[in-house]
Amino acid sequence: MAWRLTQFVDKQGKRAVALRQDDAPARLLSGAATTYELAQQAIAAGSSLLSLAQAQATGEEVDLAAALADGRVLPPLDHPDAAHLLVAGTGLTHLGSAEGRDKMHRDLADPAKQTDSMRMFRMGLDGGKPAPGQVGVQPEWFYKGDGSILARPDGDLVSPFFALDGGEEPEIAGLYIVGPDGSVFRLGYALGNEFSDHVTERQNYLYLAHSKLRVCAIGPELLLGDLPADVRGTTRIVRDGQTVWEKPFLSGEANMSHSLSNLEYHHFKYDGFRRPGDVHVHYFGTATLSFSDGFQTQPGDVFEVEAAPFGLPLRNRLAQATPVPVVVKAL
């Protein structure tokens, strides 16, 4: 049994939230126009997000598929001020993820030596799932941007004019809000396309930070409750209506070298990430990339990510930004 929330804009242009169970029709919520507002209400009431959503669900049905086709579905969580939403992630967290990363760096590394990627991956295998009450090894961590980089489900992923590549990264993202006293609340999980520039990263591993400063997508639906230990989905690339690359992907703790709680600890241990009212979207990593198979994306390609617990698939089209002048003036 899976319960999910979706944010959308109704036909009158007003924001709204809907709740649905499994494949049943979605129901409009009566007491909150955004997931952020609903979460704040739940924190104030000492209630779970699901129980509050269930109490607010009315009899009015919402056609989510139609809203998605109309471009009216929003990311499942955002913030009224995009500067107060932080998008970040962790890499080398999934079993097999080091193989794909190692392929990217093999030309720059001595084949007789273990790469930094493989060493970090092995650190996760050895210490990424600590016993309860213990702190595990730190994962690789990266910053992507603020809330302005979140594309709508079915919206364009616009690659910057200077990018060397625009590649999909099918992942699960955790969605969080920080309460008034600095306590962190996890709302749930969403499908994600983390989207990176793998060619830039391949030039030199120290370019990882540059390669991650890109738009990304989550949704369309927010899965409430616990993440299944074994998530099995499919990621594909569609070009001119034809599937040109496709692969299954695995996630969930059964397929990871780190526990989710360990990844969460090493993100939220920083005081600056526990600022009351802020929202966090955190990507947990992937082991499946078309880039690792030598596939080259091109503008117009449609990325699709789907997995059964998450309801509607996440689709986004690759687009390329036009060049803009970058000028710095003395003041």
Image (cartoon, rainbow, N blue to C red):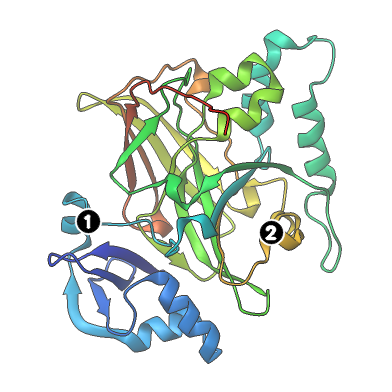
Residue 17 image offset from top left, x and y in percent:
31, 71
For marks 2 and 1, give the CA distance: 31 Å
Mark before the other along the chain sequence, 2 or 1: 1
| Labels in figure, total | 2
Residue 200 image offset from top left, x and y in percent:
57, 19
Q: Residues within 10 Å of mark 1 (few under 14, many from 20)?
A: many
Q: Which residue is mark 2?
A: 264
Above or below residue 226? Residue 112 is above
Quadrant (top left/top right/bottom left/bottom right) for the C terminus: top right
Q: Which one is in front in this view, the residue at disc 2 or the one at disc 1?
A: 1
* Direction front: furthest residue: 331
Q: Which residue is mark 1?
A: 72
Q: Secondary structure at mark 1?
A: loop
Residue 144's quadrant in the figure?
A: top right
Residue visible at 17% across and 80% down?
A: 60
Residue 72 image offset from top left, x and y in percent:
22, 56
Residue 292 image offset from top left, x and y in percent:
54, 21
Q: Nearer the viewer, residue 207 or 233?
A: 207
Residue 151: in sight, yes or no?
yes
* Direction left: furthest residue: 12
Residue visible at 44% across and 39% down?
A: 215
Above or below residue 112? Residue 60 is below
Residue 12's quadrant in the figure?
A: bottom left
Q: Is residue 264 left or right of residue 160?
A: right
Q: Is residue 160 left or right of residue 84?
A: left
Circle 2: residue type:
Glu
